[in-house]
Image (tube, grey):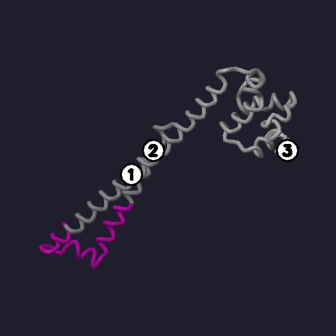
Amino acid sequence: MNVSEKILQLRKAKGLTQEELAEKLNVSRQSVSKWESGQSVPELEKLVALSGIFEVTTDYLLKPLELDELSIKTEMLEKQQQELARESRKRKEKQFCVLSCVGIYLAAIALIVLLRGISLENDFLWEIFPGLTLPFIILAAATAVAIMVCLHHRDKYDSASH
């Protein structure tokens, strides 16, 4: 693999566009395009800057090695795997939050029904909270609990993943 191929693959592995790489190096996008197509070679100063941006040695950029392509592909696959794992964690977090909320609201509704049944024998609670006030208070409390559970779980998940 020659310098032009390495620049192209390293740029893509870093997720940079030609424009973004050009900005980092204070050159035109066309210069980067020429380097990647093999029409020209970066000056020594730009090769040193490229090695810093790509976190490789100048030897790596200049010397052809058989393992270069494999190491770049491995790095790209590792990044894809990390992204998939991150997406999976987010999906699991959302599922937990939704299921928790459903459970909390079902418990709140059950409490309202239970209190309504009790109130048939004793109107004490409904006299203190007339009309629909008591169910609203219970649902508001359930909402607060659902929010706290989801935020706590998210914080726990975030700290565990770092």
Q: Is residue 18 above or below residue 54?
A: below
Tag count: 3
Q: Secondary structure at mark 3?
A: loop
Q: Which mark is residue 28?
A: 3
User: Could you say where residue 60 lies in the image, as x and y percent from the top left?
Assistant: 73, 23
The residue shown at (34%, 61%) is 142
Q: Which mark is residue 88?
A: 2
Pointer 1 or 2: first along the chain = 2
User: Could you say where residue 27 lies in the image, as x and y percent from the top left?
Assistant: 85, 41
The residue shown at (64%, 30%) is 72
Disc 2/disc 3 C-alpha distance (Å):
39 Å
Label pair 2/3, CB-CB below 8 angstroms: no
Main structural element of the magenta stretch: helix, strand or loop?
helix
User: Could you say where residue 50 lies in the image, as x and y percent from the top left?
Assistant: 78, 32
In the image, farthest residue toward the left: 121
Q: Is residue 25 above or below residue 135?
A: above
Q: Residues within 10 Å of mark 2 (few under 14, many from 20)?
A: few
Label pair 3/1, CB-CB below 8 angstroms: no
Disc 3/disc 1 C-alpha distance (Å):
47 Å
Task: Decide whether residue 107 is among the magenta residues.
Answer: no
Q: Nearer the viewer, residue 139 or 55?
A: 55
What amino acid is found at the position of numbered circle 1 in the picture?
A: Gln
The residue shown at (55%, 38%) is 80
| 152 sits to left or right of 13 | left
Q: Report the residue marked by disc 1.
A: 95
In the image, farthest residue toward the bottom: 131
Disc 1/disc 2 C-alpha distance (Å):
11 Å
Q: Secondary structure at mark 2?
A: helix
Pointer 3 or 1: first along the chain = 3
Q: Nearer the viewer, residue 128 or 112?
A: 112
- Magenta residue span: 114-143
Q: Secondary structure at mark 1?
A: helix
